[in-house]
Image (spheres, rainbow, N blue to C red):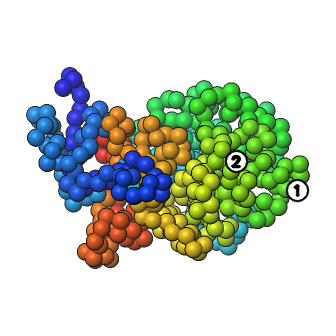
Amino acid sequence: MTQGATVRAYRGAILHFKRDPATVADASHAYEYFADGLLLVRDGKVERVGEAAQLLPALPAGTSVIDYRDRLLLPGFVDVHVHYPQTDIIASYGEQLLDWLERYAFPAEQRFADTQHAGEVAAFFLDELLRNGTTTACAFATIHPESVDALFAAAQRRSMRLIAGKVMMDRNAPAYLRDSAESSHRDSEALIRAWHGRARLAYAVTPRFAPTSTVEQLERAGQLYADHPGVYMHSHLAENRAEVAWVSELFPESRSYLDVYERFNLLGARSVYAHCLHLDDADRARMADTGSTMAFCPTSNLFLGSGLFDLDAAYRHGARVGIGTDVGGGTSFSMLRTLSEAYKVVALAGQRLAPLRAFYLATLGGAAALDLDRDIGNFESGKEADFIAIDLHATPLLARRMERCESLAEQLFALMMLGDDRAIARTHLLGECVYARA
Ligand code: GUN
Ligand code: ZN
């Protein structure tokens, strides 16, 4: 053993995915499951995973074995779309998207001019993610550069993987929340220099959505995305019918809403678009061909009355899909609750979200959607050891339903339909326990 290396072993039921179960004839080839498994972590990275009976005898003498035998160990959840400044307006009554932005989101975001407020909300937000088993997120901040500083600083203190960016918004928003094409370019570039690639952090160029950016600002966004390889592009696309109609008025020369973004070179393997509800097949094909990600945000789409994501159509076209909570349009930080709503959304279209595929999407699928599957998403050797310990008996009802389960898939389905933050017993980042349920 290297001098000073920290090696720990975690013993429990272990599940992780190797590939998307929807893309293999036999779903059992997509994952590994060890009913009595061992996860070996060295200096924050996965060293090995396998059967406890095989790995225990070979452990270096003195290795501490943490007993999670009554838990299910999973890679941490990945939330591909969320707004940290909207934490305080989650569950705000009565509006669809455009009025909801005016009435709730914009006033809440105005408060992030105050760096103390930003720091306080950032800390709560990240702790809430960890409490829900989410170890990586792709997040909106506000137009204020200090709101990004606050979030990245808080993530760095927790050694958390995070993608975030300053909102760019130079029209169709209240004066108190507008930047300019020039200032948004300058501020974004300074934030990229300050934060991108530092610790586990990455920057996302973040024009809010097409209606709140001028042509000049969208051009600047395209320049930033092109000039800084490795940075992300994060925005909203085709969420609400009134929004889609507005975009076609504002950009009459574009074939579709997606085409607006494509004209400004904003599609690509690190582009993440929330919602993608009102697309046609030509749009879906462009999303797939460019490697762009669709963030499926079911609690938000139901809450704001926006529409139903067509998961089968996304898969048919080979588009990348991740799951987002979209708090505060979304109504829960819990990926389990989000998967439950995803199941119901696709059921309304006569489709099925199989439980193995659901947990793939929440872990390795989310990592791939964020182009992070080299670093996180499963327990392959060398990956960062972000993982959670799930209590399948967290509530009386879950415990009772588990007793009747006859397969792993059935257990996972009960977990995603009945589980929430109460089922997250522990959350680990780079091997370290950062949350333990009381
Ligand atoms: N479209 C533009 N801004 C937003 C936002 O803050 N939330 C949601 N759900 N959609 C948006
Ligand atoms: Zn959003």
Label 1 sits on a secondary structure element that is helix
Q: Nearer the viewer, residue 378 or 91?
A: 378
Q: Which residue is mark 2?
A: 286
Q: Depth check: give the residue in front, 192 or 392.
A: 392
* Residue 422 vertical placement versus 177 (above, below): below
For disc 1, the neighbor class at 10 Å (few under 14, some 14 to 19, many from 20) is few
Q: Residues within 10 Å of mark 2 (few under 14, many from 20)?
A: some
User: Would the CB of label 2 be found within 8 Å of ligand 1?
Assistant: no
Instruction: Give me the residue at 80% from left, 53% from top.
Output: 256
| Residue 378 appears anywhere in the view | yes
| Residue 5 at x, y percent in the picture | 24, 28
- Position of the N terminus, as image quadrant, is top left
Q: Which residue is mark 1?
A: 249
**The residue under label 2 is which amino acid type?**
Arg
Which x, y percent locates residue 334?
46, 61
Q: In what quadrant of the picture does the C terminus appear?
A: bottom left
Q: Closer to us: mark 2 or mark 1? A: 2
Foreground of the two, 178 or 69: 69
Measuring 54% from the left and 50% from the top, which residue is drawn there?
80
Spatial CA span between label 2 and label 1: 22 Å
Three-letter amino acid code at the position of disc 1:
Glu
Chain-order first, disc 2 or disc 1: 1
Q: Residue at x 72, y 62 (%)?
A: 278
Q: Position of residue 72 (x, y in %)?
A: 29, 57
